[in-house]
Each structure stands twice: as C-alpha cells, then as structure tokens.
RNA sequence: GCCCGCUUGGUGUAGAGGUUAUCAUGCAGGAUUGUCAUUCCUGCGACCCGGGUUCAAUUCCCGGAGUGGGCGCCA
C-alpha cells in the first residue's frame, strides 16, 4: 500500500518547530500518545481529500510522514470546510487542531488490527499555495510514468514516496561511505573544478571561459588529489562533481556525475582495493541494518510491488571481494567463447560473460599498461601472458558494470615523464602536476567510484538518471 | 556517432485504411460514508509535425522532431 510511508525520523533527529509548524507529521505518529488533546499546527502537501458532505478527511504529507486531518463543519466552520473540499491535490496547507486517536479501520474477520494511529482534528486551515490541476504527473497515482516525463517535472516526481526514498538513501550512502573513510584516517578535501589543463589527455572536456583565458570543467580530481599526497596530507577523499563531454547515451552514463575519490600514501593497488571493499561492505551493511535505511528500501519495494517488479534485497557482500586478474579474465572469456585478444579492453558483451560467474562485486587487477593512463604505476618484470608490461591499475565491477577504476600511481618522475611522452602527451602542459614529483613524494594509490552507479546497484534502478536529482546527459541540461 | 524500436486525453495504455477511438488513472459535478486505494452515478479530455499513396490516413510509405533500447567510451 503506497500510503504506508516509512519516513518517520529516527529518534536521534531533532525537528525544531518552525514558523509554519509546531510538529512534523512524523512526530504526530511517533509521539501521538503524548500529544493527545494538545493543540498543534502542521503543514504539508494535500495528498488526497475524501468526503464531500459535512465531514472531510485530508491526507497531509510532509518530509517526515503522512497524517490524516479530520474536518467537521462543527469544528472548523462551513466556509473552511468547503475550501478544503474544493482544494486540489498537492496544494500546500497548514492546519491547526488537536491531536486525537484515529478510529481504527474496519478490518475483515481474521485480519490483525493495525497499531494505533493519530490524526489532527482541525479547527483552522490556511491555504499556503493552491496546486494547479491537472498535475503533470500524479504523485500517488498507480499508473506508470515515463522517465522523461518524470525528469521534466522532477519537483513533482520527487514527491512520490519511492523517488523521495531514493534520494534519502543516496544521502545515507554518502554518509556511510564518508563515515568509514574517516575511521580509516582519511580527511575530506575539495579540488578545483575549473582547470587550465586538460586533465588526462585533452579530449572530452567541457570548455569554458575563465575571464580572458580558455579553461575547462574538470573531468576528475585525479591530478590534484595526487598533489595532496606530495603535500603530505597522506590520506584524502573527495565527494564532488566530475564533468565529461562524452557523447554517450546509455543507462549508466552522465555528463555530470558525483565522483567518490580517495588517494592514499605509502600504499599500493592492493592496499586501496582493501579500503574500497571495506568501505562498500560498510555501506551495504549499514543500509541492511539501519532502521531508517531499511524503511527506505521498504518504500522502494512497496512501489516495485505495484509495478510487478521483484523486491530489491540488500545482500551484504562478503569480504574480501573476488579478484580476477586481467590475464585470467581474458582466458575465461575465451573459454566461454567470447571474442577477445590479450591487450583488448573488455567490452560489454564480454563483461556479461564474466558476470555469469561473478554477478556482484569483483576486482579486475593488473591490466596491461597500454590500456591505462600515464599516471598508473607499473612494476618492471610483471608481464602478462604475451610478455607485455602489466600495470598496477584495477577496476571494480558489479556484474557487468564498472563501478570504479583505480590503481597505484607512478611516483617516479622519470617514468612519469616517459609515460606522458609514450602516450603522446606533452609533459610541459602537465608541469603543474609533474612539479609535485620533483621534491620527494610518497608512493601512493587511489580510486574513483561513481556514486550513481553504486546507488543503481543498491536500489535496482535500471537507469542512472533515476539516482540523480537533475541529471545532465547528452540531451538534457534543464531543469 | 552507429544499429533497432516507439510517439493516441494531464499521466500511462488498447486498437483498426471508413461508424461515437478502448481501458485505467485524473479532472468536474452529484449521491453515500469516521473515511482510509471508499463505493456508486453523470460528465470532460487524445491519434507528434510535414509531405506522399488512397474515394478516404490517426492507421500504409518517405522525411523531420521527440523519445526508448543496444553498442562504442567510461565512473
């Protein structure tokens, strides 16, 4: 039932009364027994009104839950009653009244009686903003709405319980991830988003004007977080936007996304894979165990049930995550009949073959150096099956989808300059970066994780746009 | 960028070369009701744009626009 919203705030949250309300609607339910007969002022969106006669019921919704407002002509006056009865759905209303125990619904014999609920017996109403009708999309309607229609009217879409839950869950995921990294000694940083140099090779960037000079929106915090290592910050993380002007159009790509990045000194690729799997494990475990997060998942599942979609289940991944080295991945793909040669990138079709046996998280370490960017470290003597140089770069996949790429970074300045030249990049253009390696630098490693892709896996979203408030893609940058 | 599909009331859909274009949801009005996905009655509201074929096109063909899926690339 869609009206069962799992939005009551956790006990630790304090909702201080504001100019427009003395209590949240969630509080009316959670504190109801103590509030009986007290006068309260509440405010919210009118989800529905029932009753055209001498009485009327309003389902009022705010950010914490839904509560029924009971109106009787005797209490509120015939004029106010009429106003509410004629009110359009999703209008914002403010009610003053007394808290009372809601009469229990009639239940069929044999069915359990629901727990006590509370309502507000209204004595006054204030229309704050009347909603125009019809709504571009129904907030509580059971009809399916296409993603494009939803995104055009995102503010209304967000009022839908399962969509709202998605973004609350997004906040939770960021909170749990942040929490974990802090316990491992990482500090939160921010790197610039306006950059002078093409970050990793000069393509696929959004150009912009910086006063008199051309500049770009940064595609990744990569080079700057490495400079933090040279600066002795030792362990940093950043949760921030990255911009890529790639003209892709798929369920998992955005032109602006939030990158969850870390960089860690005195560490190699294996060390930061450990950080990554511990962090993801913590996020999944927290979502699976924390009451409020479970409520959000339940809200999403309640909606999925109306769409006849399978319920999502938060399966906490076991530590350590499986590791499948690049060479083994190539071998397995070939065994399964996939078309691939050593040195090729692993395309979607071949990823599907790997995902048959590894449907959840797994690491793909030790890619060929030729497939990795200039800043990735390699160890001489580590050769693949065709004798070519392996790198210390890795990916983390969830089934067929790439979640993360990371690796140990090249801290040897001669090798770094050599890499730049081999990849036909001009070391001069990267002078601001290369300079950071001239006066001592710790070996270091790190990764970047797509927050939206994590959310997709957690919530069963089939399109990454579902996990972003106002997604930017090839065709959309408004709203 | 390439390949494939789709476009019908506010939303989401069914459908046929020709009669009043289906259903759900919604909206308006009414009856009933301490309701709770209320129920019942009445009404409202749609064939993406341009061209072509045809006696007749919303339906078939071509083009455009929009949109969805797959791929490349990536997080």
Image (cartoon, rainbow, N blue to C red):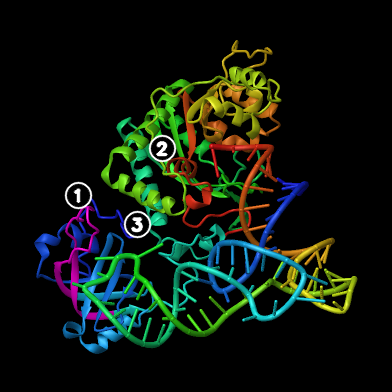
* Residue under pointer 1: A12
Q: Does mark 1 fall on the same chain as mark 3?
A: yes
Q: Do the residues labelled 1 and 2 touch (CB within 8 Å)?
A: no
Quadrant of the image occupied by residue A353: top right
Residue B73's place in the image compared with A64, above or below, is: above
Q: Residue at x 29, y 38 (%)?
A: A289
Q: Which residue is drawn at 70% across and 24% down?
A: A340
Quadrant of the image occupied by residue A158: bottom left
Q: Residues within 10 Å of mark 1 (few under 14, many from 20)?
A: few
Q: Which of marks 1 and 2 is nearer the N terminus?
A: 1
Q: How crowded is mark 2: few (under 14 residues within 10 Å), some or many (20 or more)?
A: many
Q: Do the residues labelled 2 and 3 touch (CB within 8 Å)?
A: no
Residue A341 colored in magenta in the image: no
Q: Distance between the residues labelled 3 and 1?
A: 27 Å
Residues rendered magenta in the picture:
A97-126
* Residue under pointer 3: A1
Disc 3, SS: loop
| Subunit that carries the residue with mark 1 | A
Q: Residue at x 56, y 15 (%)?
A: A379
Residue A190, given in percent of the width and then of the height, sits at 43, 44
* Residue under pointer 2: A237
Q: Distance between the residues labelled 1 and 2?
A: 27 Å
- The answer to whether residue A328 is visible is yes
Q: How crowded is mark 3: few (under 14 residues within 10 Å), some or many (20 or more)?
A: few
Of A62 and A55, the residue lying toward us: A55
- Looking at the rendered structure, the number of numbered marks drawn on it comes to 3
Q: Which of marks 2 and 3 is nearer the N terminus?
A: 3
Disc 1, SS: loop
């Amino acid at each position: 039932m869609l009206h069962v919203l799992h939005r009551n705030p956790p006990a630790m949250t304090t909702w201080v009364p504001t100019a427009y309300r003395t209590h949240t609607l969630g509080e009316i339910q959670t504190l109801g027994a103590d509030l009986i007969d007290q006068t309260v002022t509440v405010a919210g969106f009118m989800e529905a009104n029932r009753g055209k006669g001498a009485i009327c019921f309003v389902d009022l919704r705010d950010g914490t839950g839904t509560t029924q407002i009971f109106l009787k002509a005797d209490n509120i006056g015939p004029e106010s009653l009429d106003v509410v009865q004629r009110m359009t759905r999703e209008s914002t209303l403010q009610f003053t009244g007394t808290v009372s125990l809601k009469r229990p619904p009639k239940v069929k014999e044999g069915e359990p009686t629901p727990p006590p609920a509370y309502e507000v017996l209204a004595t006054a109403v204030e229309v704050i903003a009347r909603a125009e009708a019809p709504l571009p999309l129904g907030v509580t309607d059971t009809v399916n709405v296409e993603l494009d229609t939803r995104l055009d009217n995102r503010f209304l879409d967000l009022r839908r319980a399962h969509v709202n839950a998605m973004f609350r869950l997004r906040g939770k995921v960021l909170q749990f991830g942040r929490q974990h990294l802090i316990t491992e000694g990482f500090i939160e940083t921010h790197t610039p988003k306006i950059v002078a140099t093409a970050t990793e090779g000069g393509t696929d960037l959004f150009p912009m004007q910086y006063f008199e000079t051309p500049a770009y929106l940064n595609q990744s915090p990569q080079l700057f977080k490495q400079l933090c290592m040279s600066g002795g910050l030792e362990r940093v993380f950043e949760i921030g936007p990255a911009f890529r002007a790639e003209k892709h159009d798929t369920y998992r790509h955005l032109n602006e996304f939030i990158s969850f990045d870390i960089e860690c000194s005195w560490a190699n690729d294996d060390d930061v894979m450990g950080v990554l799997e511990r962090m993801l494990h913590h996020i999944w475990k927290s979502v699976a165990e924390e009451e409020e997060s479970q409520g959000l998942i339940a809200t999403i599942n309640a909606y999925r049930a109306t769409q006849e979609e399978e319920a999502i289940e938060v399966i906490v991944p076991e530590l350590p995550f499986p590791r499948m080295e690049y060479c083994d991945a190539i071998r397995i793909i070939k065994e399964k009949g996939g078309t691939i040669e050593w040195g090729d990138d692993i395309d979607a079709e071949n990823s599907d073959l790997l995902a048959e046996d590894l449907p959840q998280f797994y690491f793909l370490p030790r890619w060929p150096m030729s497939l990795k960017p200039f800043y990735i470290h390699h160890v001489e003597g580590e050769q693949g099956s065709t004798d070519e140089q392996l790198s210390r770069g890795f990916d983390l996949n969830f089934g067929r989808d790439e979640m993360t790429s990371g690796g140990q970074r090249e801290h040897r300045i001669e090798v770094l300059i050599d890499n730049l030249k081999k990849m036909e990049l001009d070391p001069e253009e990267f002078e601001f970066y290369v300079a950071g390696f001239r006066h001592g630098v710790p070996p270091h490693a790190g990764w970047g994780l797509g927050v939206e892709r994590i959310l997709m896996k957690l919530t069963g979203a089939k399109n990454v746009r579902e996990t972003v408030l106002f997604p930017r893609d090839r065709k959309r940058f408004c709203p």
